[in-house]
């Protein structure tokens, strides 16, 4: 059903989602528009990357320190790669809770951004990868 939503018909090149980020230099909002086709290409690249790192039905922790496009892309990528995303709530989960989620789910991988503390990276029970890389 997911692939049908992103089929290569006339709607594939229409606006699908706008990602808003804050420009670090100006502190202004910057919007980036993605079509269905562009978003699916990102998700398929993410699915390929996940499939090369984790077994089917593996848990993949999503630990981002803000609302990130990578999080949304890798959620669809996880479904496409037959993996299960596990959420770390960047506003509520402390270091111990984030590590607990990794352990209890037996996660095989953690996807992060540059803002995740080195303490977590050092203590994580599985590989930690910067999702933007």
Image: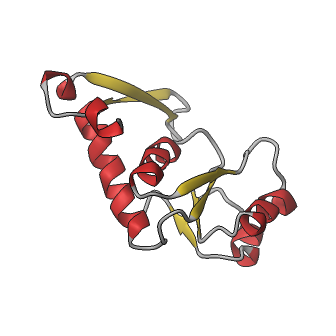
x then y, percent, for residue 64: 62, 50
Where residue 8 sits, quadrant-wise, is top left
Of 65 and 85, which appears nearest the observer? 85
State which quarter of the image contains the C terminus: bottom left
Of 25 and 11, which appears nearest the observer? 11
x then y, percent, for residue 53: 45, 73
Badge count? 0
Q: Is residue 77 left or right of residue 120?
A: left
Task: Look at 35% across and 37% down and name the residue there.
Answer: 2
x then y, percent, for residue 86: 65, 53
Of 40 and 57, which appears nearest the observer? 57
Taking 131 as reference, is 89 above or below it?
Answer: above
Q: Is residue 61 left or right of residue 8?
A: right
Of 44 and 15, which appears nearest the observer? 44
State which quarter of the image contains the N terminus: top left
Task: Look at 21% across and 33% down and name the residue there.
Answer: 7
Q: How is the image coloured?
A: secondary structure
Q: Is residue 55 left or right of residue 62?
A: left
x then y, percent, for residue 89: 73, 45
Task: Look at 20% across and 22% down and name the residue there.
Answer: 11
Taking 7 as reference, is 119 above or below it?
Answer: below
Taking 112 as reference, is 37 above or below it?
Answer: above
């Amino acid at each position: 059903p997911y692939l049908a939503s992103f089929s290569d018909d006339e709607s594939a090149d229409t606006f699908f989602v706008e990602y808003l980020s804050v420009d670090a230099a100006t502190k202004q909002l910057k919007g980036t528009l993605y079509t269905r086709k562009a978003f699916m290409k990102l998700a398929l690249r993410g699915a390929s990357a996940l499939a090369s790192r984790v077994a089917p039905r593996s848990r993949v922790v999503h630990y981002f320190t803000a609302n990130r496009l990578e999080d949304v892309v890798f959620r669809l990528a996880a479904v496409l790669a037959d993996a299960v995303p596990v959420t770390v709530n960047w506003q509520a989960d402390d270091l111990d809770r984030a590590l607990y989620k990794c352990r209890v789910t037996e996660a095989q991988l953690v996807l992060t951004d540059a803002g995740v503390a080195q303490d977590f990276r050092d203590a994580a029970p599985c590989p930690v990868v910067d999702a933007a890389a």
